[in-house]
Image (cartoon, helix red, strand yellow):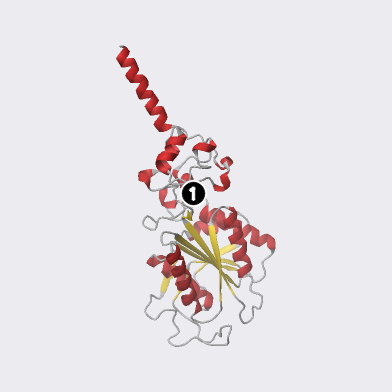
Amino acid sequence: MLVTKKFVLILLCAVWYCFTPTQLNAQTSPGTGQGNFGSNGFDFQNYEIYSMLNVNGQFALSQIPNNDPTLFTDDISNLGDALLLVSRTTTNGVRDVIVVVSGFGPFPGVPNNQSPVVAQELANLLEQEGIESQVVIIDVLWGEPDDRIDQVITDIACEHPDQQIVWIAFGSGGGFTLELEGDNDQDPTLEDADGNLPVPPYLNDPSGPPIVLGDFNGVEIVEVLDGLGVEISGSNNADNYICDSTCYKLYRCDAEGSIDLGVFFHIPESPTPGEVSIFTSGIIHVIFGPHSDPDGDGRDNIEDAFPFDPNMN
């Protein structure tokens, strides 16, 4: 009996040692061990959420954003929320995701293009959320979207080949609009910012398909933004100008896998600061929120998690 009790005691101690939060972090996290889950006293809810976060070692744990334990609340109750949390952390100092946010320079009829203002506003909000961003301004020149987008994607891939790329583009004109497709068509009568017309055969890509659809849940994006107070609609016509060239290029990059998500919005020529604030914060909510539904199946599941898994969406 004494041997049995001793054996049980040793077994219990071993179990306690292996499953304390600190030991769990030491076993699974490649981070520094400072400011991690265990040292901040997060209640692992009987190890369940932690297990979710470390499924087959796929999602490595690291530091709490801004070393703030208050970010962990009872709302962290499902795999989507847990993976969102991981997306906002770093692993060995390298971000998992970068969000490229782009606007355009001035062009005929729009000398004060507001798309760079909206792009910078969204980038600021992303940084506040702990998500790395990069602002890119595309010159309004025929052929420029292809060259600039390829350059940015190549630069990111060379510096951080394991980093996922999300690209959100803004163009000026009309109202708030989500462009649902890019068309392989250029208006031969429209001059660019240097006064040049497109060259025949007036196609964004002579070897490309006539239309490329955006790989996202457009209905949800429009409905959520509209519910937040943004007067927005979906569009199947990006106007066959430089905006459409950019939209077509991004949606092709998404379809071919060189980026993980591409979304193009048009904005009013002169949006108010209040409209910009609601719009950009709404984008954070609908695209990067824990309950977004980018795969459009109406369910909260691992396919919806940000960072997005291109093999699952």
| Residue lying at the far top of the rendered structure | 1
Task: Judge whether residue 230 can be spotted in this image.
Answer: no
Image quadrant assignment for residue 274: bottom right
Q: Count neighbours of disc 1 (C-alpha within 10 A) and say few if under 14, some if 14 to 19, many if 20 or more.
A: many
Secondary element at tag 1? helix
The amino acid type of the residue labelled 1 equals Leu
- In the picture, the quarter occupied by the N terminus is top left
What residue is at 46 percent from the left and 42 percent from the top? 78
Task: Judge whether residue 258 can be spotted in this image.
Answer: yes
| In-front residue for pair 222/96 | 96
Q: What is the x, y in percent for residue 161?
A: 41, 62
Where is 206 relative to 280, above or below?
below
In-image side of 48 versus 176 (left or right): left
Q: What is the x, y in percent for residue 228?
A: 61, 54
In-image side of 18 versus 99 (left or right): left
Residue at numbered disc 1: 84
| In-front residue for pair 310/151 | 151
| In-front residue for pair 172/162 | 162
Where is 224 relative to 168, above or below?
above
| In-front residue for pair 241/233 | 241
